[in-house]
Amino acid sequence: MSYVYRRTGSAMAITSATTCFAFLSTLSSPLIGMRGFGIFTALVIFIDYVLVMTLFCTAVVIYHNKLENRSCCSCFSGGCCKTVNPTPTMIALENSTSNRGEGEDNTEDKISKFFRTKVSSFILSPNARLILAVIFLSWLIVASIFSTKLEPTNASDQFLPEDHPLQKSFTILGEEFNFAESDPALEMFFTWGLGDVNRKGVNQLMIPDFAGSPVFLDTFNFDEECQLEMVQTCDDLLFNKKYIPYIKQTVDGQGTVKCFMEEFGAYSAIGNLENCDSVRKGAWKQTNWTVPLDDLPSFMEKFLNETSCFSDTRSTILSYYGAELGWDGNRFKYAGISVESSVLDPYSNAPELVARKEYDMMIKISEGFDVTMEEKCGSKAIMTDLSDTGGKFVFMNNQLIYVRSSIISGFLGLGIAFVVLIISTRLLHIALLATLSISCVLVSVLGIIVMLGWQLGSVEAILISIVAGFSVDYVVHLAHSYERTHGETDARITKAFGEMGISVMNGMVTSVGASLPLFFCQLQFFKKFGTFLCITIAFSWLFANFAFMGILAQLNVPISKKKKMFGF
C-alpha cells in the first residue's frame, strides 16, 4: 500500500485538484444553474478522491490482513475452510521484488507492457511523429473552421428528439401556425411607480426563491394630470399603427391592451359599468371624469368590486387587473398597462435574437412615454414581462450570458489547469504543452458540436464551460509521471507510458462506457451530455497520449535534476 501511495497519490491529488478548480470556474457565471452544476461536480470529484484515498485503501488493507489468507472450499464437495499461505499479494510482492532486482519485470501486465514498448516506441519514432503531426494539424484546422461557425440557437431548447411524437406536436403548434386572436400571448407590462429591485441579501444559490424586494417610488403621484396622461398612453398603445408588428391586434384592428384606466374613467363619468358599449366607445372621455387624490379611497372601494366589461369570465376589476393595479387601500403605489406580444407566447422560449428584437422595441416604446409620464406622474416606466407565465426576457438575457459564460469559463479553466500544472511540475514547458493539449481538446469538441448540427443553447453552453474540467485528467497524469521519473527524454517517455499508460486507458474506457447509456435517453439534455462526455474523453485521451507525448519527444527538452522553474 505504501508503494501505491507513492506511485499514484500525488498524481491523483494533482488531477483531482485541477479538475475541481476547473469545474469551479463556472462560479464566474452569474447564472445559478451553471454555478450549482460546477459546485456539484467539484464536490463529487473531491469526495471521490477522499474516499479512494481513505475508505478504499482501508478496505484493501483489512481484506489483506483479515480475509485474504482464508479460503473456503465448496460445502457440496465436503471441503472446509483453510489457510492460504503465502497469499496472492505476498507472491506478487516477492515476484516484483526479485524481478526488479534482475532489471526486468516479468510479471508486468500485457497492457502496461504494450504501452511501455509499442506505444512509446511509436511515439519515439521520428516518422511516426511526422504522421501524427500531419493528422493532428489537419484535424485542428478543420475543427477550427467549424468552431467559428458555432452560432447561438435560433429555436427554443427541445426536451425530446425531433422525431418524438410529442416534440413534433410542440414544433407544429409553436412554428407552423400564426397567432390567432384567441391564442394566448405573452403579456408585457409598462408600470409607473416602481424602481429597480432591491437586491440586498439576494443569494439564490442558498435561497433560490428570494430574488429581491420591490421598491416603490415616493415620487409617483396618481393625481388628475397623471390619470389623463395614462388614458392617452392607453390610446396610443391601442391605435398606433407603428406597433402592429409587436403588439397583438384584435379583429377590429386595435392592440390587445389591458388598461384599467378605460374602466376607471368610465366608472367615474357614468357611475357604473353596466353599459359596456358606452365604456368601450369612450364617449366618457369628453367629460370631466378624473378623480381627485382625496376622493380615491372611497372611489376605489366601490370601483374594485365592479364587474369588468373586458373580462370574458365577468371577473371583478380587482381580479381582472390584479397585476396592473397597485392600490394598497390608501393610495396607488404603482399603476400599469399590459399589452400582448405578437411574437412571443407564454409557453415556449424564443431564440435570443427573436426575443431581443421584441424587447428592444418595447423598451423604445416605454422610453417614448417617459418624457410626459415622468412630468405628469413623477415616474419613468419599468417594462417587464414578469407575470405568472412570463420571464421570457430573463431567459433571453440568460441565453446571452450562457454564451459569455461558456467562453469565460472555458478560458478560466485553461488558466487554472496551467497554474496547477506549473505548480505541480515546476516546469514551464510541460505546463504550456499540457495546457495546449487541453486547448486542442476544446477546439475539437467545438468543431464536433457544429458538425453534429448543434447550436449554442443553454445545454451546450454549460457543457463547453466544463470541457477543461473533463479533459485535464489524462494529460496531467502523463505529465506528472514524465516529470517525476529520471533519465533522458526517451527514457522518461517510456517509463511514463509504462507507469501510467494502463491507468489512463482504463480511465478513458470506464468514462466512455459510463457515457454510452446516456445515448439512449429520450431527454435531450442527458443525450447531449452523454455525447459530449464521450467526445471529450476520447479527444482528451488521444491528444494526451499522442500529441502531448509526441511534442515532448520532438522537443527533447532536458530536465535539470534540481527541477528548476522554467525547465528550459
Image (cartoon, rainbow, N blue to C red):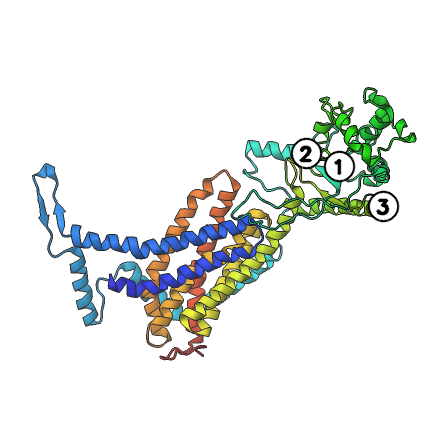
Which amino acid type is marked by label 3?
Thr
| Image location (x, y in percent) of residue 113 | 29, 63
| Residue in front for this viewpoint, 259 or 172 | 259
Tell me the quarter of the picture where residue 538 sits: bottom left
- Residue 453 in view of the camera: no
Q: Which numbered disc, 3 or 1, marks the residue that appears first in the sequence?
A: 1
The answer to whether residue 423 is left or right of residue 315 is left
Q: Nearer the viewer, mark 1 or mark 2?
A: 1
Write the residue at 64% across / 43% down: 155
Q: Residue at label 2?
A: 176
Write the residue at 54% across / 34% down: 164
Which amino acid type is marked by label 2?
Glu
The answer to whether residue 395 is left or right of residue 60 is right
The residue positioned farthest toward the front in the image shown: 294
Q: Nearer the viewer, mark 2 or mark 3?
A: 3
Q: Residue at label 1?
A: 331
Q: CA distance from mark 2 to mark 3?
A: 41 Å
| Labelled disc at residue 142 | none
Which amino acid type is marked by label 1?
Arg
Q: Residue at label 3?
A: 372
Residue 268 vertical placement versus 201 (above, below):
above
Q: CA distance from mark 1 to mark 2?
A: 47 Å
Q: Which numbered disc, 1 or 2, marks the residue that appears first in the sequence?
A: 2
- Residue 433 in view of the camera: yes
